[in-house]
Amino acid sequence: MSNKQSKGGIQSYIPILSSLSSYNKDWLRFDIIAALSVWALLVPQGIAYASIAGVPPQYGLYAAFGALIGYGLFGSAKQVITGPSAAVAAVSASVVVALGASSGSDDWIAYTAALAIMAGLIYILLGLFKMGWLSNFLSRAVLEGFVFAFGIGLIIDQSHKILGVDSVDGSYFQVLIGTLQELPETSIPTLVVGGTAIIVLLLMRRYLPKWPRSLIVVIAAIAASSLLDLESYGVSIVGEVPTGLPTFGLPDISGASLLTLAVGGLAVIFVGFSESLAAARESASKHNYEIDSSQEMTAQGFANGISGLFGGFAVDGSLSKTTVADTAGQKTQIASLIIASLILLTMLFLAGLFTDLPNAVLGAVVIDAALGLVKIKEYRRYQLNRRDFAAFMAAAIGLFFISILAGVMIGVVVSLLMLIATASQSPVRPMGLDKSENLYVDAKKYPDAETIPGVLVAKIFGQLFFADAENFRTEVMELVQDYEPHSVVVDLDAATDIDMDGVEILTKISGELEKQDIKFFLSRVDSANMELFERIGAMDEIGSENIYTSVRAAVAAAQQTEKSSPAETSQAPDASNSQENSA
């Protein structure tokens, strides 16, 4: 739990109040410098990402303004910046296109804002019900595969702006094919403008990484466009960007679209929250404080909801913008509110300056951001593990060849399948006695450990439940075939959870071994599981006299059973079934 939880009261829900109550005036200059640094990056990116979401450029400013207010008030991470992102903007567009609206139309704009509000509501509900733990079940491999393919797809998607050709609809693969077919129609002046912008951005990325390269290139492009009248050469420009305040309120949409928007809201959360939480955790780790994942969900909910109420599109916490803020010395979320004020001034007085901005330069800004998503090292790293690589590629292929939503859905399904597969494969190990440490260890890992002739000690590491029960039985019976024991001892000390299916499989194993004249013993069954055994009658089938509090006692009983007569055997458990060394 974070500091804000320890305060209690309203500060538990609005962390900015805690920051204000303990704010050091010396921090203000750092928050102002950070705000100016992020503003310089956020304005050109927000306008560029609006085109990805399919809305006019000013809506990128509306989204940024709402997001900064929402996260600034409710976020538990002190350095995180929430605003427009390329990935979430693309998810937004893919959801809205499914509703049959035309890009840039009034219906499209309304559905885009409604999607942000819907995502915000779902976020807030998840946060209020303390469901932040759900983020732990999103496979990192799937998310990285999604981001990797999205970065490549985004570069392809923006290439028509650099070339000055018509845009192509469809999957990223279809866009690639269509754009290649459009190559003969390339506008040379547009290519020169867009190509120059990309080269300058890449050079600044390499040699001047701390400079606000996007803003510098955008300002230079606007100046060049105005002085040289680039539009007369066939270079497409943004056109009029109205100044003034956005309208605040609920968008006018059809009730029939709510289900689609709800599903789309979940897609936004799947893609957006992973980056948001990663940014929050990284900042908290670096600055030695705690964040609350459920509160982060609530904060992202308000960021999306307020963005939508201002007419903006869905947003998320940004690793790149957070890095800029942190590098500039941001101390608290006061900086987010300062950035929101700067965005407000931009909407009121500066938005019109972007009228002459070439669309090719906007495309270059997006491509520059997309290059940061294509991490070849991550691709190579996931090749080291077959299952992770399969998950990585499944999400990537679904997104690239089908659609963004398909990539999201495939990612969710693959994450769940990986979770189930992992949970249903709790390993079973044969154990031997390490005399130097006086405890039982994995006999395969430590071949010098002593195994008792005729006695197989098997230990399960993980859950013994419905998804794993049959696999457990198979592994135990395979060990029986390999070791040919006269007695089997199953150690349940590391069985983190046992359900009724798990208990029933133990009784089944006991019955199968009995038919082979092999004695069956259990050791280290905790009190909760013993109660379950008794309630469903497993004690009668396994025999209470065959359950021991230590492996050592169970092994002693197994050895005594082999040596003693049936009458003597019945007395053995009473002599040895007592608390001993944990082995």
Image (cartoon, grey):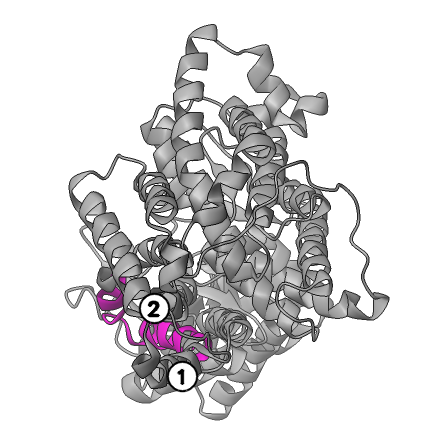
Please state which amino acid type lies under the numbered disc 2. Answer: Ile
The spot of residue 26 in percent (x, y) is 42, 8
Which residue is found at the position 48% from the left and 37% from the top? 81
Q: Amino acid at mark 1?
A: Gly
Residue furthest out toward the top:
25
Q: Tell me if residue 386 is in the magenta stretch.
A: yes
* 416 displayed left or right of 33: right
Magenta segment includes 544? no
Mark 2 or mark 1: whose residue is earlier in sequence? 2
* Mark 2 or 1: the one toward you: 1
| Residue 479 located left or right of residue 13 | left
Q: Residue furthest right?
A: 255
Residue 363: x %, y % from top left: 38, 59
Q: From what the image shows, is residue 92 above or below residue 413?
A: above
Write the start and end of the magenta stretch as one range.
378-399
Q: Secondary structure at mark 2?
A: helix
Q: Quadrant of residue 377?
A: bottom left
Q: Identify the element where label 1 is drawn.
A: helix
Q: CA distance from mark 2 to mark 1?
A: 16 Å
Q: Is residue 193 above or below residue 211?
A: below
